[in-house]
Amino acid sequence: MSIDAVIYVLCQNIPGAVPVRWSRWLRPILLLTFPESRRIRSAFFNLRRTAVDVIPVFALYLSTIVFASIVAITILGNIELFYPDGKPYFPSFMDAFWELYVLATTANSPDVIIPAYENNRMFILLYIFVCTICNWLFMGILTASVYNSYKTHLGEFVVTNVAKRKKKLDEAFYLVSTPGPDEEPGVSQATFMRLMRIVKPRRSDDSLKVLFHILNKSRSGFLSLSEFGRLSEYAQAKLVEVELSRKYFQTFVPKFYDVFISSAFQTFKGLVEHDVTKYFFISLVIINGFTAILCRGYPSIQDAIEWFFTMIFLVELILNYLACGGVHFLDDGWNIFDCIVVFGALFGQILQASLESIGMIIPPGITQMLLLLRLLRLLKVFSAIPAFKVVISCIVTILPSLMAYTAILLILFYIFACFGMEVYGNRYESPPHHNYNNTDCYHSKLAGSSFVNYHYCLFTFNSVTESFIFLLILTVGNNWQIFAEGLVSISNTWTRLFFLVIHWSCVLLVLNVVLAFIIEAFLIEYDPHAMQFETYIRERLEEMGMHADTELAKRGIRNYNKTGFWISRSSLNMAFPPNSPRAKAFYLKSDTASIEILMFRMFEKEVDDLMENYRSSVIRPRLQAHDVYT
């Protein structure tokens, strides 16, 4: 990069030289060298191995298109056919290959077959062959191959990382272990606590003690080599600490208690929480969506209807607050979402009404912003329908794990953007005021082209931002061949290779890998069954008398983890009499927001098999005669 910078500076001072920065595309490689980019490196490594594995399938896919191109040029080459815009139809093999490759992506369907079909109806067989074999069959096989290869390499990566961590833990074990009751090496609870206070300083001592006893399956008071080797997995388990005390559970007593426990209010609460009431408000959200469309031409009616629905949803929010007794209302993320949606819409309507009442002319930009605030009410459909809530919760959970693949896609965009800006930058631009009548976008070879007719001159490689937008549009895939032909017109046919590489790397590879990851992660999150290690943790908590649900049930308290939980004063007095001692309990909360936990859940069986058959390669040193941390 330094040499390239020096050459660039020298070329700028040489008359007639054209300086080009060819090393810019290497800059993202520096990102992979940072210690904090470990996840991006691992994702890139799996992506590279997947790309190698699917080469045979992709080669077969291209070979099929080559065969179809040979057939097309053979039977159509001697027939002088033209596209509706006057362009020659399949003038050469490369043109035929390009058009049929684009057809396999459905971007130019059915335009590409129309000239041949008009000449002879039998030529539709070529169209059927490319669509069925190249598009439906091979595209499906290619997606399945990427999915299978990616999952295999991801599993190998997870198991390899677990093995590496196990080896490091084995080394640490022999450094801190002492002879146990049976003279075998082990890590005492005191040593474990001191180590974990350094590694996990924010975790409480009670939580660390529970973790020790969960690991100590032998109940010997010393962690063996195999037990200590599971520390990295079990330490990531999200144990939520519950304080079994009167002070803590007083927060679950309804704020307006005397009114709340009355029979009349309980009847009211039952009505609010009844399914009929829920379906009623769901129908109102849907009706609000229809009125927003149907009443656009009647501003006064639309304004009155919007005020009506805003007030209705505000009343619904108040009813839900009253029904839960004001107990931890904002602890539920969906309640926060409803508050933002309803109060955001209410704020927008009040602000707009206030500005209009004083005769202030509202700029168009602010009007659109206020309109968006008012339309926030329609988002309530996501929280109103239970099935939507489940799916959205799954999506929110797996989104953080997709950041590494998003980073890789942005790296590829940066590389292609650097190349595009050097080769195609400032070659054309959109006409003034986007007036495309009799314009060539400042490049004579674009005059009358579909690129200009479709107003695609707006998308350029003139800057980084415009380049990223251009690449995003290409990745979506619609009409990408028109963009390619536009750039071919101002350069040469080798530009098609640039677009093919973008399609191969960004669409066929990266997006298919992202699809594979989403499928695996979503199915795991959507499937409510517990993992073996989660079941074991719950069993150990119950054995230790520290499982929150079990201990609360002994005190007559149930459904603590469910939304809408509250406790009466009589139940509070029975469960936690005044001056009763405090205690601690825990419950395991499923957490897949961490990519480590998510991948561990994907390959739990493989990890368990590894741990059962693992044989440590660490040489056992002479044991310490005493606890080194005592």
Image: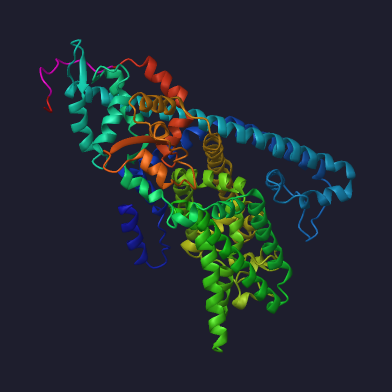
Instruction: Kindly give the residue lying farthest to the bottom in the view shown.
Output: 359
310 vs 603, nearest the viewer = 310
Left or right: 163 with respect to 287?
left
Q: Quadrant of the C terminus?
A: top left
Corner quadrant of residue 175: top left
- Residue 429 in view in this figure: no
Q: State whether residue 371 appears in this view.
A: yes
Q: Quadrant of residue 611?
A: top left
Left or right, residue 508 beside residue 298: left
Q: Quadrant of residue 294?
A: bottom right
Q: Nearer the viewer, residue 401 or 359?
A: 359
Q: Position of residue 598 (x, y in %)?
A: 45, 36
Question: Measuring 77% from the left and 37% from the top, which residue is drawn there?
Answer: 129
Residue 500 shown left or right of residue 624 in the figure: right
For the image, the number of numbered tags is 0
Q: Is residue 339 above or below residue 371?
A: above
Residue at the spot x=14%, y=15% of the render? Answer: 622
Residue 464, percent across and down? 46, 61
- The answer to if 623 sits in the magenta stretch is yes
Is residue 181 one of those drawn in magenta? Answer: no
Query: What colour scheme has been applied to the protein in the rendered image?
Result: rainbow
Across and down, in percent, residue 281 comes to 64, 57
Q: Residue 622 versus residue 281: which sits nearer the camera?
A: 281
Majority secondary structure in the magenta region: loop
Spot occupied by residue 165 in the image (x, y as percentages of width and height): 31, 28
Q: Which residues are magenta?
A: 617-627
* Along the line of sight, the residue nearer the viewer: 176 or 73: 176
Tell me if residue 467 comes above or below residue 516 in the rendering: below
